[in-house]
Image (cartoon, rainbow, N blue to C red):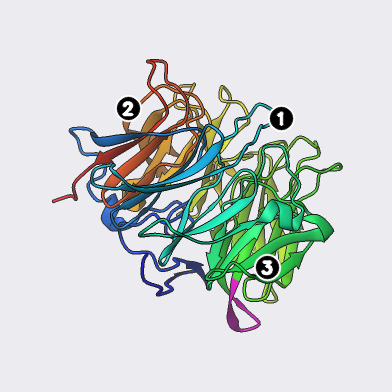
Amino acid sequence: MRFLNTLGLMLGGAFLFSSSSLAGDWPRFLGPNHDSKVDPADAQGFWPEGGLRKQWEFPKGKGWACPAVVENKVFVFHRVGSREILDCLEASSGRVLWNFGYEAPYRDRFGGGDGPRTSPVVYGSSVSVFGVTGRLHCLDVESGRVVWERDLAKEYGMAENFFGHGSTPLWVGGSLIVPVGGSGNRCVVALDGASGSERWVTSHEWGAGYASAVPARIAIGGELRDLALVFTGGESRPPTGGLLCIDASNGKLLGQVSHRAKIAESVNAASPVVMGRRVFTTEGYGSGGILSEIGEDGALRVVWRTSKLGSQFATPVGRDGLILGFDGQSSQLAELVCLDAGTGEEKWREDFGGRFGRGSLVDLGAGGLVALGEFGELVRMRIRPEGAEVLQRTRVFEAPESWTVPVIAGRRLYLSQNERGRDGSSPRVICYKFEAAK
């Protein structure tokens, strides 16, 4: 990750970014390629028969941020009191190498918690964090020194939305892209990664949602173009939002598809899932899922719609011609659903016996899928068109709101407990070590 060689993964005529990550890195939310897929070298030997071996744990404050891991550093973004804090830990020991914090008083008017919703993003020699109050900091990876900072909420007139600001920034081509949903229809902004100065603004009336943008490299007009796919839609009456396809070099809007529930108290929170030229978006308040296709001119057209998979916030996974994600807004009724990516047909659904809740998925490739349930239960499963076969299962803790995506990097598993457990355990990041398969 520390070297700025841009890598591409060809997928059916399109490229999905790797933004220069190395094997063993998980430098951003949803992993090296923005698709929850684990590097094959890290997937080997995961979850040995003897069980997971805890290496260390780190007490954390409030929030749901996903740790970022680069080389031997782990970045944890959380709230302690009135401050948002970024801790840089040594991956092998959990020892704090440096930390950075700032005052960010905030109270969620819906009682959903005041911790950060976004995750650290490491790119080259910098790590960026975007807090719940709309402040963006870019820091030096080695020292924690502030390189630049912006108060985007103030500068762009961002609406507070239901739960503050919660879209993890996206690095593309040296720019940091942030959905702001600001005043004057300033919908998405790109900042220069070195200085923080504005590079471009995409104008659109849709407000900022909670989904994190993802990149794609697609042939547009016969030429490969870097695109930012933004699933947006924040607090508005009537509710509006959907998928935007933006040229990442200049902010030009190429295509859009409306996708938003009819009720005002809804948000778009699950990130787009890119499968070649096709993009799946899902929303859990009644609007379900939509598969869109990116045309030769960048315009978006709807291929199919479904009511069978409506994810409230967890991003689905696309693999082997299937789309897998957790359907439902209720922890009691949530189920893992498998769709045919070509047609949208539901193939099966699985609730793991109940009380698994709205899980987060990580793709091990040949090793199957890993799911962390929202109460702390971990499952590894083999996926088939006819159903899921559970291979391993354990409860790592019992605590609500365990919504943070598991991280597998450097042959370590990082799990986040976000609330106090039934056994009295406090919120923490737990690191498990495993060895490569012989």
Indicate yes or no whether the magenta region holds residue 220: yes
Q: Is residue 42 above or below residue 429?
A: below
Q: Is the residue marked by circle 3 packed among few (<14), some (14-19), or many (20+) residues within 10 Å?
A: many
Measured in 3D between alpha carbons, the distance from the residue under mark 1 to the one under mark 2, in whole angstroms, is 36 Å
- Mark 1, Cα crowd under 10 Å, few <14 / some 14-19 / many 20+, is few
Task: Give the class, few, some or many, for how many residues have Cα within 10 Å of label 2's Cα (few <14, many ≥20).
Answer: few
Decide which of tag 1 and tag 2 comes sooner along the chain.
1
Instruction: Say whether residue 185 is left or right of residue 349.
Output: right
Segment tinted magenta in the rendering: 219-226
Sequence-wise, the earlier of marks 3 and 2 is: 3
In this rendering, the answer to whether 337 lies above or below 419 is below
**Residue beneath the point at 71% across and 36% down:** 285
Give residue 47's position: percent from left, percent from top. 26, 39
Mark 1 = which residue?
109
User: For numbered disc 1, what is the local secondary structure?
Assistant: loop
Q: Secondary structure at mark 2?
A: strand
Relative depth, front residue between 164 and 302: 164
